[in-house]
Image: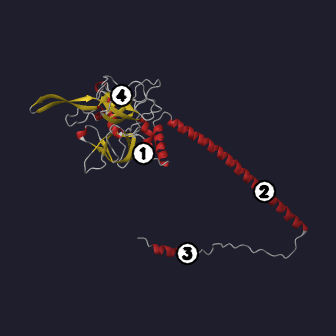
Amino acid sequence: MDDFNNFFDDQREQRPEPNTPIYHTPTPKNRGGKLNTASIICIVIAAVMCIVVLVNVIVLASLKQTIADEYASQISANMREQYRQAIEDALNNSDVVEDVTNSATQKALEALTSTVGQVANKKSVSVARLYMYESATANPSTTSASGVASGFLITDTDESGTAQRYLLTNAHCVRYVKKTRTGLSPFGSSYEYVWTSYGKIICTFEDSETSYYELEIVAYGSYNDENKSAENDQADVALLRIKGTQPSNEAHPSLKIASSDYTKRGDAVALIGNPEGVGETNSVTTGTVSQTGISIASWGAGTFLMTDAAVNGGNSGGPMVDILGTVVGIVESKLVDESIDNMGFALSAETIIDFIEWAEKSENNILNKALTIDFKVV
């Protein structure tokens, strides 16, 4: 190993070579004489020249800096314009635009400290309050509804306002098992159980000029009833569309659906719906996502999100939205027991999209034709 102590000792012992010159500042000589007139004139001229040279140097330096600043400013302006144009060209007709927009929206919402409840409140105009009647000839003005539920718009009408708008709800909101007595004997009555749809389904929207809109079922999934097993292998979702006059896109815009199950445990969410049909407007409840990716075989296909947000009868079919107002789930049900608190469930966004794509096929919808459901995905 190298001996570092010896190395430094050797350096300290080094001395200048004998022939190394040592420079000293010369000592000025004092001649002891007086300055003559010529010497004074020379000194004055030299001083004036020095001042002139110094002024010129200062002026030139100032001009140089001014020119440099103006040139740099011009270059900066040109570069900014080039960068701006380059960014616009890069983002033009690109999917990046939507990503940037969503990111900007997210940051803006965070900056404004908006709560998920406040966002949901603004989206409430897109959520329908559903009322179901067993008879197709029922008069909603005089007949009590057999059931209440929620739904939400997923498409807009066309420019002419004639294209029918679609909305989503749960299958169990618009389909039920009808019980019919088929016989009577000393040992009791016998019954037949058959899946059927409600005869009339209507909905209302907040701030709508129309008292109510009539709906028709286009496609439906299924769930397990206590008296009848599920009638198909699809999730408990139903696709409906509005008959006759359509609500305007401006007053009641469609909601966007999350393109994937990006919702995480702990995320803030809000439920918008029509619990028990109370009030003239929708209700909003907030909470967090407790779990994701849950399967509940007895409730049918699809995956569920669990939440501690309040779920009550009539909330079924309503949207679960995140801080951006994007639909991340469709409210399904809740667990009820004396030992259970705040365990509500919503079908995931992925399940919703899978159902819509299934319903678009002619063999899977009541219309028996291929459909193009122009719903928005983010």
Q: Which mark's residue is nearer the viewer, 3 or 1?
A: 1
**Badges 1 and 4: C-beta atoms under 8 Å apart?**
no
- Decide if residue 177 is on the left or right side of residue 126: left
**Badges 4 and 3: C-beta atoms under 8 Å apart?**
no
Would residue 324 be visible to someone looking at this image? Answer: no
Q: Helix or strand or loop: what does disc 1 sit on? A: helix
Gap between marks 4 and 2, in whole Å? Answer: 90 Å
Q: Which residue corresponds to mark 3?
A: 14
In percent of width and height, residue 71 lies at 67, 45
Q: Is residue 340 above or below residue 273?
A: below
Q: Residue at x 85, y 61 (%)?
A: 45
What colour-coding does the image apply? secondary structure
Q: Helix or strand or loop: what does disc 4 sit on? A: strand
Q: Residue at x 45, y 44 (%)?
A: 118
Dot label at residue 55: 2
**Badges 3 and 2: C-beta atoms under 8 Å apart?**
no
Q: Helix or strand or loop: what does disc 2 sit on? A: helix
Q: Which of the two labelled residues, at mark 3 and mark 1, occupies the earlier sequence position? A: 3
